Image (tube, rainbow, N blue to C red):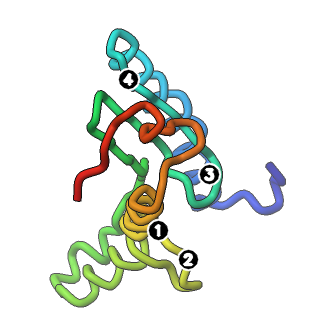
């Protein structure tokens, strides 16, 4: 990491990804589901879920978020301010990029059209239900 660009936000982002997501979350899920007949896949690629878990015919799509809401936002008491803040961090950011909820919606749409390459559940005889 370039020390000249070291900010709280870049530090928090690095800790969130490298420690919370990669070390803690992934290790925990691998441990929790090692004895299940489960498909567990982690991805760092854009447009893919942070975690894809399929147990039998049930699919779980997980986006890991390590986020702090500022005291200023919380103590404002303004529904509009809090709602806008949460939407920018969990729906779409200022640049229009999908975040959390929108990412999951897109992934569900992709699964409705087909399967992810790493788990072709249709070839395994599992039917999709709407």
Q: Earlier in the sequence, mark 4 or mark 1?
A: 4
> Which residue matches tag 3?
11
3 or 4: tag closer to the N-terminus? 3
* Residue 97: assigned label: 2
Q: Where in the figure is residue 75, as x and y percent of width and height? A: 21, 75
Asked if marks 1 and 2 touch (Cβ < 8 Å), the reply is: yes
Residue found at x 35% / y 17%: 37
Residue at the spot 62% in from the left edge and 51% down from the top edge: 11
Q: CA distance from mark 2 to mark 4?
A: 31 Å
- As helix, strand or loop, the secondary structure at mark 1 comes to loop
Q: Earlier in the sequence, mark 1 or mark 3?
A: 3
Circle on res. 63? none
From the image, state whether disc 2 or disc 3 is nearer to you: 2
How many angstroms separate mark 3 from mark 4 (CA)?
34 Å
Residues at discs 4 and 1 in contact (Cβ within 8 Å): no
Residue 38 is tagged as 4
Q: Is residue 72 above or below residue 19?
A: below
The crowding category of the residue bearing disc 4, from other C-alpha atoms within 10 Å (few below 14, some 14 to 19, many at least 20), is some
């Amino acid at each position: 990491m370039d020390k000249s660009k070291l900010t709280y936000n870049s530090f928090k982002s690095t800790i969130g990804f490298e420690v919370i997501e990669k070390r803690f979350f992934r290790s925990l899920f691998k441990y929790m589901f090692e004895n299940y007949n489960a498909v567990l896949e982690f991805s760092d690629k854009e447009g893919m879920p942070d975690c894809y878990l399929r147990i039998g015919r049930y699919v779980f799509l997980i986006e890991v978020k390590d986020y702090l809401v500022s005291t200023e936002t919380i103590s404002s008491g303004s529904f509009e301010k809090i709602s806008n803040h949460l939407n920018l961090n969990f729906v779409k950011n200022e640049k229009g990029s999908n975040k959390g909820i929108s990412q999951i919606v897109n992934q569900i749409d992709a699964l409705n059209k087909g399967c992810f390459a790493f788990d072709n559940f249709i070839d395994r005889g599992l039917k999709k239900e709407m």
